[in-house]
Amino acid sequence: MELGKQNVILITGGAGFIGSNLCEYFLSKGNKVVCLDNFATGHRHNIAEYIKNPNFTLIEGDIRSAADCETAVKGVDYVLHQAALGSVPRSLKDPVTTNDVNVSGFLNMLVAARDEKVKRFIYAASSSTYGDSELLPKVEEVIGKPLSPYAITKYVNELYAEIFSKTYGLETIGLRYFNVFGRKQDPNGAYAAVIPKFVMQLMKHESPKINGDGNYSRDFTYIDNVIQMNELAMATSNLEAINTVYNTAFGDRNTLNNLLDYLKEYLAVYDPNIANVKIEYGPNRAGDIPHSLASIEKAKNLLGYHPRFSMQEGLEEAVKWYWDNLR
């Protein structure tokens, strides 16, 4: 990322949770941002405040269309590819659409970026790639077998990116996101992430339901750490740091029971009755990994990554945003 220059950055899935936060950040730094989204899971309200910004361009299109991808990359310096159909349960219910978007759409974007000769292609990879590997913490070079169609698609992304780097010289960096949360994350819908879903239930004094006994653990990662990693991936001039993948996480884990304890504590600041809301437990969910913890040593060593927000610090910020915006 050339400092002091107005870079042109394409953010696919730019109306989604992570994508819209990236749009906001890079616009605030004086860059030109192109957002490509088909609004299948993204929301117009996430980008409404940028529409009149002369440095922001919205392209309503689909990464499954090669023509839309070609249009979106015209004149672009960097691609931040966030567009995907997330959710393990969704992929189990509809593996074909998940594959069409996450694999065919990803390949369309790689081809378009290659042909346009973009400087670097940075993409959202996933901690689901670790599959049934029981090694903790997770290190980038040791993965297991995927546990869901979604996990397969995200691993295939990494394989395609590696081939495009080796064969065509396209600079790529994959960021294996670990349970990202924060402002603008959608609490509604069948496949809502646990944190916004739990927050909304607690604010309504409804009992959140945990899949399993609550002792599954995750490396919950605040959105600002993810933005930081995307910026570092764009900015690095270290040749050793490109054409590879990085864990994008805080490097600590908390159980779902811990998570709910923190959420109740932080929400009770605004409504003391939330502290007394009971938690319900149900069966484990198919395709779920029991424990997830990232080693972030590779990102520290090669990108200079030092995450700014712990899970607790991020939760306090996120809870305040939800309280102010979604009550």
Image (cartoon, grey):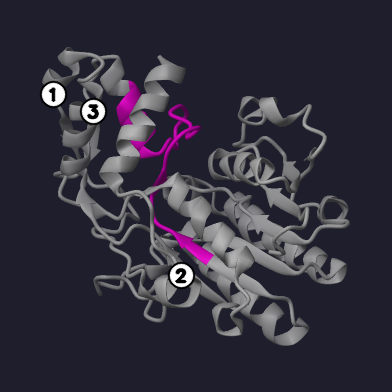
Q: Which residue is mark 3?
A: 266
Q: CA distance from mark 1 to mark 2?
A: 42 Å
Residue 142 seen in the figure: yes
Is residue 295 part of the magenta span, yes or no?
no
Residue at (28, 63) in percent of width and height: 293
**The magenta stretch spans which residues?**
175-200
| Earlier sequence position, callout 1 versus callout 2 | 1
Figure disc tally? 3
Q: Secondary structure at mark 2?
A: loop
From the image, state whether disc 3 or disc 2 is nearer to you: 2
| Earlier sequence position, callout 3 versus callout 1 | 3
Report the amino acid beneath label 3. Answer: Tyr
Residue nearest the viewer, comparing 271 with 83: 271
In the picture, residue 223 is in which quadrant? Answer: top left
Residue nearest the viewer, comparing 8 with 20: 8
Q: Which residue is mark 2?
A: 304
Image quarter (top left, top right, bottom left or bottom right) of the C terminus: top left
Question: Where is residue 135 shown, x and y percent of the image?
Answer: 25, 75
Report the amino acid beneath label 1. Answer: Lys
Q: Secondary structure at mark 3?
A: helix
From the image, state whether disc 3 or disc 1 is nearer to you: 3
Q: Which mark is residue 278?
A: 1
From the image, state whether disc 1 or disc 2 is nearer to you: 2
Question: Where is residue 62 shown, x and y percent of the image?
Answer: 75, 46
Question: Where is residue 115 shown, x and y percent of the image?
Answer: 86, 70
Q: CA distance from mark 3 to mark 1?
A: 16 Å
Image quarter (top left, top right, bottom left or bottom right) of the N terminus: bottom right
